[in-house]
Image (tube, rainbow, N blue to C red):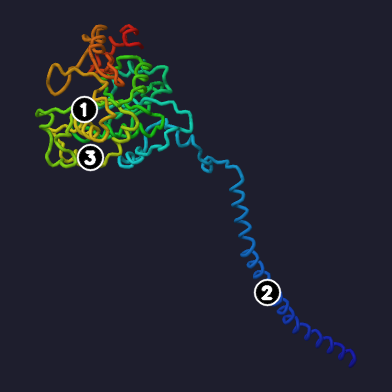
Amino acid sequence: MESRAMVLEEGKERTTNQVKGLPITLLRVLILFVTICAVFSVISIYTLKHFGIESVVTTTVMKSSFQPCRGEQDRLLDLEDWIRPNSNPIHNMSDKELLWRASFGPRIKDYPFKRVPKVAFMFLTKGPLPLAPLWERFFKGNERLYSIYVHSLPSFQPQFSRSSVFYNRQIPSKVAEWGRMSMCDAERRLLANALLDIYNERFILLSESCIPLYNFSFVYNYMMESKHSFMSVFDDPGPYGRGRYHNEMAPLVNITQWRKGSQWFEVNRKIATRIVEDTRYYPIFEKYCRPACYVDEHYFPTMLSIEAGNALANRSLTWVDWSRGGAHPASFGKSDIREEFIDRVRSRHQCKYNERNSTVCVLFARKFSPSSLKPLLDMDSRVLGF
């Protein structure tokens, strides 16, 4: 009995000692585990910092350098991206930004690609183009040789069909008032938008009442082969010429340099760039040439006669009839449209073309009312050539 009691007592004591020793063993194991984890973490961080990240970055850079780009946003730009004209002239640039961008130009004369020069037809209008069907016929079949830009009142919403050459050709515009600098702003805006297309080489300003007097091929070749730009420039000593001069414009512009001319011009790319990049003459014309000084008759003719007089032919390619007097030229309607009338407009001129005498001096005419459209379309195609 005593021996059994002793055995039980020893077992109880051993069990008690084991229970007391268990927490100490677990604590030691836990401390060892934490220590190992800490050492492993330090080693991992050190390795990743000095080897891992650099390897990842290097691998990423190497992959970016050598793997072909698959997304449109990652595609490398090529020459085509810089020279491809926009199919729609709408943009978000301000006038200041637009003129700055349009003043860019290549300094190397030879183009590193096949460049077929185009004529930019710039229509300055309040709203509709009532003679558009005649122009559609004129442009037909010459799609690679021209571009079209239309400046109308901002509130005007054109209704051209998708098949029309005038579809989506409206540029961002502002109100242009006759005789004020806003009119010259509109013309510069047209030029600047047209200059964004590197293929445009000649620039002709037209109104909604203009018509072509020859077919497209004749007009295109006449402009492209000309050594000069066409802007009417003359010294008018009378009250409607020098009489509009303001003495405060000197010394930048003296009265002997003051010129007058037609609003309707045709210029090459170099002269077009000169017009949009001008910041020297613009401020004084804006400040001192106000009605009864009509700035659209004086700003460009005066500036260009000073800066590039030898580059101008000193005549306009657009015929108008001032024989009836008044502030505006004569207008022509349905009853005026005859073959004899067209021949008379085209043939009663003498001028110089590339330093040679010529009887072909005008390519366009104005002002033609909407009623003239039908007889013009019904006219024998041999008269106008289209």
Front of the two marks 1 and 3: 1
Amino acid type assigned to the residue bearing label 1 in the image: Val
Q: CA distance from mark 1 to mark 2?
A: 94 Å
> Horizontally, is 365 left or right of 38 in the view?
left
Front of the two marks 1 and 2: 1
Q: Determine contact: label 1, label 2, CB under 8 Å.
A: no
Which residue lies under the disc numbered 1?
233
Report the quarter where the C terminus lies.
Answer: top left
Q: Determine contact: label 1, label 3, CB under 8 Å.
A: no
Amino acid type assigned to the residue bearing label 2 in the image: Val
The percent position of residue 71, horizontal first and vertical second, equals 55, 41
**Residue at the image position 32 percent from the left and 39 percent from the top:** 99
Choose between 88 and 96: the one closer to the eye: 96
Choose between 320 and 111: the one closer to the eye: 111
Indicate the secondary structure of the residue bearing disc 3: loop
Q: Residues within 10 Å of mark 2 (few under 14, many from 20)?
A: few
Specify which label sits upstream in the sequence, 1 or 2: 2
> Taking 333 as reference, is 12 above or below it?
below
Specify which label sits upstream in the sequence, 3 or 2: 2
Residue 169 is labelled as none
Q: Residues within 10 Å of mark 1 (few under 14, many from 20)?
A: many
Amino acid type assigned to the residue bearing label 3 in the image: Tyr
Residue 281 is labelled as 3
Specify which label sits upstream in the sequence, 1 or 3: 1
Which quadrant of the structure image shows residue 278? top left
Residue 34 is labelled as 2
Report the quarter where the N terminus lies.
Answer: bottom right
> Taking 198 as reference, is 161 above or below it?
above
Indicate the secondary structure of the residue bearing disc 2: helix
Q: Residues within 10 Å of mark 3 (few under 14, many from 20)?
A: some
Choose between 32 and 371: the one closer to the eye: 371
> Horizontally, is 50 left or right of 9 in the view?
left
